[in-house]
Amino acid sequence: MANYLAQFQTIKNSCDHLIIAVEDVSDLWPIVKARFEERLPIKRACLNNKTRNPVYVEQLPAEFILTTDSRLRSRFPQEQSVFWFREPYATVVLVTCEDLDEFKTILKPRLKLIVQNDEREWFIVFVSKAHPSNDQATKLAKKIYAKLEVDFSSKKRERCCKLDIHGSEPSFWEDLDSKIVESIRNTLDRRIQFYEDEIRKFSEQRLMPVWNFCNFFILKESLAFMFEMAHLHEDSLREYDELDICYLETVNTTATKHREFGGVDHGDDQAALLKPGYKPLSQIVQDDSFREFEFRQYLFACQTKLLFKLNRSVEVASRGYSFVISFSKTLALHENTLSFCMREVWVITACLALINATISHYKDGIVAPDVEKEFYRLQGDLYSLSRIKFMRLAYLIGYGAHIERSPVNSAALSMLPWPKPAVWPLVPPDASSEVLAKEKMVFQANPRVKHFGIQRKPLPLEPSVLLREANRRRASLSAGNMFEMLDGRPGFTDGSGLDSSLRVSPLKGNVSSMSRTNSSPGNFETTVDRPMRLSEIQVADEHALHQTISDPDLWKSLSSLEGFEQKYLELTKGAADNYHRSWWKRHGVVLDGEIAAVCYKNGNYDLAAKSYEKVCALYAGEGWQDLLAEVLPNLAECQKILNDQAGYLSSCVRLLSLDKGLFLTKERQAFQSEVVRLAHSEMKHPVPLDVSSLITFSGNPGPPLELCDGDPGTLSVTVWSGFPDDITLDSLNLTLVTTSSVDEGVKAIKSSSTIILNPGRNNIILDLPPQKPGSYVLGVLTGQIGHLMFRSHSFSKGGPADSDDFMSYEKPTRPILKVFKPRALVDLAAAVSSALLMNEPQWIGLIVKPVNYSLKGAVLHVDTGPGLKIEESYGIEMERYTKVMQSAGDNGHAHDAGEGCSSVAEEFMQLTLTDGKVQLPDWASNINSVLWLPVRAVDDRLARGSSSVTPQTQSIVDGMRTIALKLEFGITHNQTFERTVAVHFTDPFHVSTRVADRCKDGTLLLQVILHSQVKATLTIYDAWLDLQGGFVHIGQGNGRPTSSFFPLVISPSSRAGILFGIRLGNLTTGGEADPDSILNIRYGISGDRTVGAHTLVAVENSESVGDKQNFLFRSALVLQRPVLDPCLAVGFLPLPSGGLRVGQLINMKWRIERLKDFEENADSCDNAEVLYEINANPENWMIAGRKRGHVSLSEKQGSRIIISIICVPLVAGYVRPPQLGLPNIDEANLSCNPAGPHLICVLPPALSSSFCIPA
Amino acid sequence: MASTACFIIVSRNDIPIYEAEVGSALKKEEAAHQHQFILNAALDIVQDIAWNTSAMFLKAVDRFNDLVVFFQEVHELYIKILLNPLYLPGSRITSSHFDTKVRGLARKYL
């Protein structure tokens, strides 16, 4: 059957559609042909697929062929069964008849004969030529057709249809279509069944020796081809898939048999995986099967063709990729029979062919997005694969120095084994000039030096040293495995191949390899080919490749460096673009980096920088620092060349920010020097940069700094510098963010001077201006190095900045600063509340009480109010307050006192007042202390004594003096405290007098009562009375009482009395010069300034209180001469008996009687009028009526008048009643009854029963 | 067996937070870069798979089933690290204890 292959091929080529046979019984075909063929291709044909499920084929191509046609004749039955797919699928019998007899005798038997072949699917089309107007003919035709139906149609199946040529019968054509489709369907089913049976039968024999794959293939492909003809592509594809699997099984199970692989023909290097007709099958047949190389490509090509017909380009790509991979492995197995690098070349061409075919068939946008992604990913994979193989070829022929030793290339190439030809190609004899050229090229291509002097071992592009690999393959040809024995040395194979292959000169490499071979037995110079040098290998490779590669375009790409670069770029770009489209950003971006490397090499720095930026952004964004460290220097170099200072600066800073372990200190120092150089160069604009990973900061551990409102402070911040060397910052700012309120925003604090950061940890002290109350956390660190404005958001977590730089942590919100709400920080108060002595120097004690706040350096401004002055002659004293309290007997502060023991020497101090200011001593900054100010309250008025008649009316305000105090404190005297302290001054005594007794001889005993006003013991040494005119002392005394009483000691708040004996004297003797009597008291005071009034002496001198410290107190007394010539008498008329009650109205009455005439005032007519005035305490009395007025009183002696007024007492008790005064009348002319003040009793109000509620 | 394996834990944001080279082969200086490179590229695949399956991504990427015990044990360790209140999730794992344990597991299972 294998001989049928050629025939099979031609049959397949000649027929690609179904055939419908036309049995033209009545020579009708020429008439109806055109109308029949109009129906083709058949629309929406319903066919059954292999699993007997209906499938609708939209357009089924077919061809009508007459049975008399040569194509349907002269076939052998043997052929027919195998190539049954080309036989007609339906037979249309065209008949006409116009005579019943003719039908019966001629047509019917003929038809019976035609249709007796059961194999065929047939149906009869009766063509009626009768004109519709010809009624008889029409009838006849109908009759004959009816006969026909009876004879040929069965109940199961309608096999007849009628076409009226002259009539229009649209239903006929539909009928025809359905009948054709029905026939085709039935035929197809039957044939499928047939093929399946055959194939099954064949498969059963599979393990038998007679089995022949070719025959199986022909059957299987016939079935597949039939499906394809019937447009059942899915089924066809499945057949090919099965064939593929079956073939692979055959190949694998029969591997022991020696077979030819194929692929040795010229042009086989170009993949034919998309060209089913590349080689005729008959050429690739071998024994009972096919050569693998060609046949697998053929099968794949058939599948591809069907997939494209099914619009499944994505599947083509995915199947293609895996096919390329698996086929490449197969090629590797047979590499020793193939030409040099055949495998690599095949893969390149296969990938490119797949890419071109799928892209041209791919219709954008009709597939789901994820399928589209998949498609582009496959494109990227294909590009990438061909790119790798292309690089390998380029390396072999000496372009290795032009391939970037990047991780991506290294990863791809260093794990890709060398080609394994049976023998490494040998240098052609006349190639010495080429060898020289290669050597020159190697020397010229100076290896790319990394920027910043970064020393790195270059990544390998080769799995092992090419020099050795090639020589080994040559040597094994003639000298066994001599070199393989040498391979056993460790460290030679896995060492970097580059050093020995590229850096070391070929001569040296030769020598070293020679020395090794010399040590081995035998003389290699004679028995073995001389080991090739690298350049020789490259030339040999080039020649061998030239032999292998049949594609002129591919060879052109490899024959020159420019060609190589162009192709390399094309493949890289293709891969990168497709990966980007497939959202494989990492793959895409990495390849962008490769494009950038080429751009860089060609001086296209702009593009290179852009691409490198993408790569860096990817790695930086994901924190793959090792990879970033590889690329970032390249970007920096591009930026440097482009004079993109800002970018370059940024890159340098980023390089510094990377993990310290990634670069040597020397390299990092180089980065820093670049940063510093750039920052201080002449850039136009400052460059803002984020250095969060390079400079980190944190507050000091421990509790936050606590400040009172309005206080400045210094904030200590720890800053970690990631710079390898010291770096000078021109300025450094730090923002503080309030934790409480958002609207407050941020406050920046600045360092005043330049700061030098050492590598590692630094403590920076920043001045902190007064802040608003609240708690603050550190915000952003900003600063400047030349034109570089950096900012850092990064908190270090207490250690040196680690490398998680690109992560955004939630910032710790540990407050670094707390500013308290305004509160009292100090209190100033008067130490003594009791009164001090007026007009005498006195200590005023001011308690300075710091409230948890240091008063260090505080200054007190003292401003005395009116009537008070500071005694300059005394110093200001200051002492510890607790001590004062203790001495006062208060033990409550014993604890404080004990604490203060250590500094007892400092706890008393004399201070001086300059310009109204006192500087407080340091020892008093944290303790309560008392400041003693010597003052004197000035009151020019003479103290007035009170008599028992006129009550004491001295107001407390008179003795009040104020001191305005202002305390400036805090670190920069930013805090102030102001207070006005009131101090009460008083005279030592209040003097009241009363006439104790009036003796018959006119002597008056004047009792002077001294009320002590101060909280101090007063000692009276002497007292005398300077009498006013009209009074004289009795006897010839000087007005002093008996001196034996003195000194008279008066305890605080007690009273003492002194009795003076006086009598009335001549009024004229005194004259008007002395209106008042003056009481002089010489006294001493023994008081404590912490309690009250005292003598003003320094505390330490307090024992030496002597007479000198006596004070003189003068008080005026009013002595009244008795009334000698009363003119008017005023008498208070008695009140009604029964007493007064509160709220009761009473009538107060006074009687005024004229005792004698006023001679001196008689001419005044007004004298008839007397002015009166009622004085009453409004708290005690309510008065109804006129309080003041004139009453007329006759001039005559003895005339009298009664003044009455209605009063209501308001309070119960003994109260002074209202008094009647006559302001116009001199007191001396008045005689009152009662003479002095008197009291009356007022009862409480009577109970009102109406308010009583019975129980 | 002179194979080397590189084990990297990658956080949610594709950031490597732990890295260990395990295996018996001599450590090459340049290999570190390559391993990182390859694993980084592998993230593309993981990312694709993350859209398609809710199951473990690695299962779909590689011979996961051979290594399932190893991964389970490392996961246990990782959870212990996460439970440490001083460890900030997503930051680099610097615990030497973790490192030792992972290497031990690698010797045992890989």
Image (cartoon, rainbow, N blue to C red):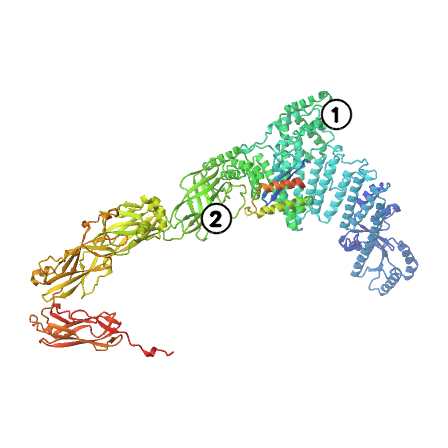
- The image shows residue A503 at horizontal and vertical percentages of 61, 27
Labels 2 and 1 positioned on one and the same chain: yes
Mark 2 against mark 1, which lies toward the viewer?
2
**Position of the C terminus of chain A by quadrant:** bottom left
- Name the side, left or right, on which A1231 lies relative to A631: left
Residue A425 shows in this picture: no
Above or below, A263 against A15 in this view is: above
Above or below, A647 against A184 in this view is: above
Dot 1 corresponds to which residue?
Answer: A478
| Chain letter belonging to callout 2 | A
> Residue flagged by tag 1: what amino acid is it?
Ser
- Name the side, left or right, on which A504 lies relative to A140: left
- The image shows residue B3 at horizontal and vertical percentages of 67, 37
Q: What secondary structure is marked by label 1?
A: helix
Local crowd at mark 2 within 10 Å, few (<14), some, or many (≥20)?
some
**Position of the N terminus of chain A by quadrant:** top right
Q: As rendered, which of A497 and A1132 lies closer to the eye?
A: A1132
Dot 2 corresponds to which residue?
Answer: A814
Q: What secondary structure is marked by label 2?
A: loop
- The image shows residue A245 at horizontal and vertical percentages of 78, 44
Residue A718 shows in this picture: yes
Farthest-out residue, front = A1044
> Residue flagged by tag 2: what amino acid is it?
Arg
Q: As rendered, which of A773 and A266 lies closer to the eye?
A: A773
For residue B36, what is the image quadrant?
top right
For residue A320, what is the image quadrant?
top right
| Chain letter belonging to callout 1 | A
Who comes first in sequence, dot 2 or dot 1?
1
Cα distance in 3D space between marks 2 and 1: 79 Å
Above or below, A343 against A868 in this view is: above
Number of dots carrying numbers: 2
- The image shows residue A385 at horizontal and vertical percentages of 67, 39
